[in-house]
């Protein structure tokens, strides 16, 4: 039975209708929750909600589901696959106890790995709501999540990058130029991933073949992905296209995912199809998922929940399929959901913390739209905080400006900055390749070569004279 949550503060009584209401009111302010009508009415009410939430036993989240079990396959996934044995070490804790334990030395990297299957998305969302930014960074930095395909992502003191060579007309020369630009900055070890301007099977296949040729020609230890709909990728596999990773944007409720045109069975079919290709060399994590706070609300599929709790539930979907990569596109939907740099920063740190605690290889598209109250300095701040927190990967786009999707994100040199300042490397296999190709003289310290690498110099001379067949 759903209980009523009540807190007495002096002569005033604060009452919250149910756990979902309490979670929403405890959430740090953001415009999406205001739009949904679930935000706290005042800073005092938010503080009271956080105090009350801290006293909620973790077991409550197993008995009082936020979206009805009978109506939602994501809820069924969360409850049915909960690991009781993994949960046992923390089963006696409240949300506040859990926070204190996470921040303690008892919560080592090894211990966090042991409990992750026993932690639900709602539990991690709840604890994140009573944590400061530095708390989110400290705990996320202790989480170790490693995945692999043609290289290894998520090792300590590493920061990988998705090389994102989008083009407004999918022009092959424009895409190839962006790929070359990124490789020369040491970007692309997470994935070379293209958002197609024209989204259909034929175009996806064409772009997959382009990237496969580049990766094969230069023997790059990385993977490619066309960010097309999962059903298109299944058809590409059936047609014999060179598919490395299967992509899909996902949400935290069944209704959200239905609005995206898929369900868990669709993802399972795609996962098995990609595994059957056996294209990985050092691992077989074949899925790539993107998420973002506000997607459930924008689809009118949030069930009255706050957007951060819905976001955390999406990570249960991702966790089911052992992905190579997951990232939150944190500021992409716009100021209606995350209004300014402060809200975007908080959301990025929350998403990274929650996903890592649940065992996902989590990255972040550190980004904003041009009508948000944010700028590139806000992105510099968030990039630095996330890299400090152990973020698995970030985006790399020419000049930080995606000319196809029309939003602002991080550039190749932004990732280079983070690696240099924080002493972070690319994936180990990719670092060896960077030195072999003479792109870098000291890849472990992100030192670029002063000369154009010989392998690329010949290609560029051919392009200039029109004699290059590659």
Image (cartoon, grey):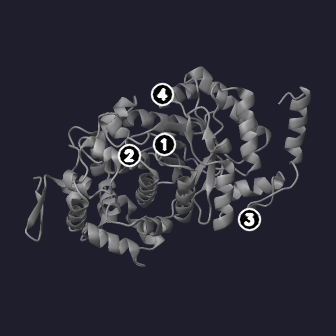
Residue labelled with disc 3: 445
- Helix or strand or loop: what does disc 2 sit on? helix
Q: Position of residue 158 (x, y in %)?
A: 62, 61
- Helix or strand or loop: what does disc 3 sit on? helix
Q: In the rendered structure, which disc, 1 or 3, sits on the residue that comes first in sequence?
A: 1
| Residue drawn at point x = 65 percent, y = 26 percent | 170
Question: Residue 314 — which label?
Answer: 2
Which callout, 1 or 3, points to the residue nearer the camera? 3
Q: Position of residue 64 (x, y in %)?
A: 18, 53
Which callout, 2 or 3, points to the residue nearer the camera? 3
Q: Are marks 1 and 2 in contact (CB under 8 Å)?
A: yes
**Is residue 254 something one can see in this rendering?**
yes
Query: Residue lying furthest left in this view?
Result: 11
- Helix or strand or loop: what does disc 4 sit on? helix
Q: In the rendered structure, which disc, 4 or 1, sits on the residue that comes first in sequence?
A: 4
Question: Residue 256 — which label?
Answer: none
For this view, does 406 lie left or right of residue 412? left
Classed neighbour count for the residue bearing mark 3: other residues with Cα under 10 Å, few (<14), some (14–19), many (≥20): some
Q: Are marks 4 and 1 in contact (CB under 8 Å)?
A: no
Image position of 236 with respect to 83: above or below:
above
Q: CA distance from mark 1 to mark 2?
A: 10 Å
**Is residue 279 something one can see in this rendering?**
no
Residue labelled with disc 4: 231
Residue 40 position by quadrant: bottom left
Q: Are marks 1 and 3 in contact (CB under 8 Å)?
A: no
Q: Are marks 4 and 2 in contact (CB under 8 Å)?
A: no
Q: CA distance from mark 4 to mark 1?
A: 14 Å
């Amino acid at each position: 039975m759903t209980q009523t949550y009540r807190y007495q503060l002096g002569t005033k009584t604060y009452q919250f209708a149910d756990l979902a209401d309490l979670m929403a009111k405890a959430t740090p302010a953001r415009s999406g929750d205001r739009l949904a009508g679930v935000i706290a009415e005042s800073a005092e009410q938010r503080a009271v909600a956080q105090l009350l939430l801290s006293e909620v036993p973790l077991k409550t989240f197993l008995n009082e589901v936020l979206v009805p079990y009978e109506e939602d396959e994501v809820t069924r996934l969360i409850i049915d696959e909960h690991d009781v044995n993994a949960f046992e070490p923390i089963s006696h804790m409240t949300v506040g106890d859990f926070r204190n334990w996470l921040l303690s030395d008892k919560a080592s990297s090894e211990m966090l790995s042991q409990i992750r299957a026993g932690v639900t998305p709602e539990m991690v969302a709840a604890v994140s709501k009573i944590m400061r930014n530095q708390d989110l960074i400290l705990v996320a930095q202790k989480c170790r999540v490693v995945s692999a395909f043609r290289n290894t992502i998520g090792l300590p003191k590493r920061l990988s990058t998705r090389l994102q060579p989008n083009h407004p007309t999918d022009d092959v020369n424009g895409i190839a130029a962006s790929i070359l630009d990124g490789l020369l900055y040491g970007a692309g070890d997470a994935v070379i991933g293209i958002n197609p301007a024209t989204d259909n099977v034929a175009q996806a296949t064409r772009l997959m073949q382009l990237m496969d040729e580049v990766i094969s020609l230069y023997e790059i230890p990385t993977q490619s992905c066309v960010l097309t709909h999962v059903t298109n990728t299944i058809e590409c596999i059936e047609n014999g296209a060179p598919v490395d990773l299967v992509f899909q944007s996902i949400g935290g409720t069944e209704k959200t995912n239905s609005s995206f045109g898929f369900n868990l069975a669709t993802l399972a079919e795609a996962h098995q199809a990609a595994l059957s290709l056996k294209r990985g060399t050092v691992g077989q994590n074949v899925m790539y998922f993107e998420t973002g706070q506000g997607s459930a609300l924008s689809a009118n599929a949030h069930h009255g929940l706050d957007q951060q709790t819905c976001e955390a539930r999406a990570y249960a979907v991702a966790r089911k399929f052992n992905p190579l990569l997951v990232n939150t596109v944190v500021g992409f939907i716009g100021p209606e959901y995350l209004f300014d740099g402060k809200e975007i920063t908080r959301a990025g740190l929350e998403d990274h913390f929650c996903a890592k605690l649940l065992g996902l290889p989590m990255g972040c598209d550190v980004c904003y739209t041009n009508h948000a109250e944010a700028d590139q300095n806000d992105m510099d701040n968030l990039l630095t905080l996330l890299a400090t927190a152990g973020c698995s990967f970030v985006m790399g786009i020419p000049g930080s400006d995606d000319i196809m999707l029309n939003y602002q994100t991080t550039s190749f040199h932004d990732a280079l900055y983070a690696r240099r300042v924080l002493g972070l490397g690319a994936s180990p296999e990719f670092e060896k390749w960077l030195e072999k190709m003479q792109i870098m003289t000291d890849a472990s310290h992100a030192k670029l070569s002063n000369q154009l690498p010989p392998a690329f110099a010949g290609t560029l001379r051919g392009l200039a004279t029109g004699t290059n067949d590659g």
